[in-house]
């Protein structure tokens, strides 16, 4: 599954609640785990795979592998900490971000069962990062504005280069196809 990158609209939309946890959602969850393993991530949210849905998956290790559907962060600690974050949607960029150390979160699991957990450490960090994705917020938005603007500009240029390259490739292929068609016409004497 493709991971959407900074600059793509779906990452900036507010995601909507999952209505029913049907086979389609269950398949999506499985595909999200697979995509996360493939890309060496520890968390992945719906909008990152182009789905405007309030769900995310987290896998820190063998013990902590969790699905969060329609999550709500119920409380956050006063105490905050700094931690260097990254994101599959902003590849190659890492920045220390300040967030509450402890949180309480309520959500549904992959079977539709409600749960509440108190999290701290890396899990609390990951949940807050992924929750932000559901609100259209990226970790760079929580860094200083100069850094954020620089990264957004960098990715916009990268995207521009990609689009230009793609257009050149298309033009080249069209030219080649035309050439081949002309050659064929010459050989057969058939115009159509
Ligand atoms: C969010 O982040 C997170 O740039 C999950 O080249 C971040 O999985 C949770 C990744 C910090 C807790 C702490 C990023 C992989 C993965 C990259 C990720 C990259 C390859 C990021
Ligand atoms: Co992310």
Image (spheres, rainbow, N blue to C red):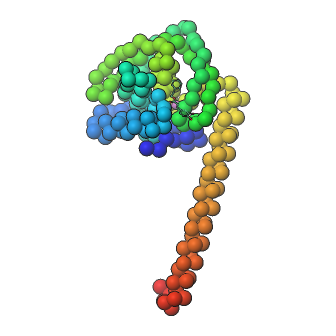
Q: Residue at x 61, y 28 (%)?
A: 94
85 horizontally vs 103: left or right = right
Q: Nearer the viewer, residue 171 or 59?
A: 59
In what quadrant of the picture does the N terminus appear? top left
Q: Residue at x 65, y 51 (%)?
A: 161
Q: Residue at x 60, y 66 (%)?
A: 171
Residue 79 placement (x, y as % from top left): 56, 8
Kindly indicate the quadrant of the structure image that contains residue 173.
bottom right
Residue 166 placement (x, y as % from top left): 59, 57
As drawn, 43 above or below 160? above
As drawn, 104 above or below 129? above
Q: Residue at x 28, y 36 (%)?
A: 22
As drawn, 63 above or below 147? above
Residue 127 placement (x, y as % from top left): 46, 22
Tally of marks: 0
Asked if residue 38 can be seen in this view, the reply is yes
As drawn, 76 above or below 152? above
Q: Nearer the viewer, residue 65 or 168?
A: 65
In the picture as drawn, the residue positioned furthest to the front comes out as 62
In the picture as drawn, the residue positioned furthest to the top comes out as 78
Asked if residue 46 can be seen in this view, the reply is no
In the picture as drawn, the residue positioned furthest to the right comes out as 146
Residue 113 placement (x, y as % from top left): 28, 23
143 horizontally vs 12: left or right = right
């Amino acid at each position: 599954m493709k991971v959407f990158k900074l600059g793509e609209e779906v990452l900036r939309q507010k995601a909507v609640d999952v209505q029913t946890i049907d086979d389609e959602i269950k398949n999506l969850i499985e595909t999200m785990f697979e995509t996360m393993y493939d890309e060496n991530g520890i968390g992945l949210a719906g909008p990152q795979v182009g789905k405007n849905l309030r769900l995310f998956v987290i896998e820190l290790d063998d013990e902590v592998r969790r699905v969060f559907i329609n999550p709500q962060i119920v409380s956050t600690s006063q105490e905050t900490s700094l931690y260097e974050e990254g994101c599959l949607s902003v590849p190659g960029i890492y920045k220390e971000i300040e967030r509450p150390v402890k949180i309480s979160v309520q959500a549904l699991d992959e079977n539709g069962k409600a749960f509440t957990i108190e999290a701290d450490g890396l899990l609390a960090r990951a949940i807050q990062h992924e929750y932000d994705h559901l609100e259209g917020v990226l970790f760079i938005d929580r860094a200083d504005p100069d850094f954020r603007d620089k990264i957004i500009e960098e990715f916009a240029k990268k995207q521009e280069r990609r689009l230009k390259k793609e257009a050149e490739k298309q033009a080249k292929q069209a030219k080649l196809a035309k050439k081949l068609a002309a050659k064929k016409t010459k050989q057969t004497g058939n115009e159509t």
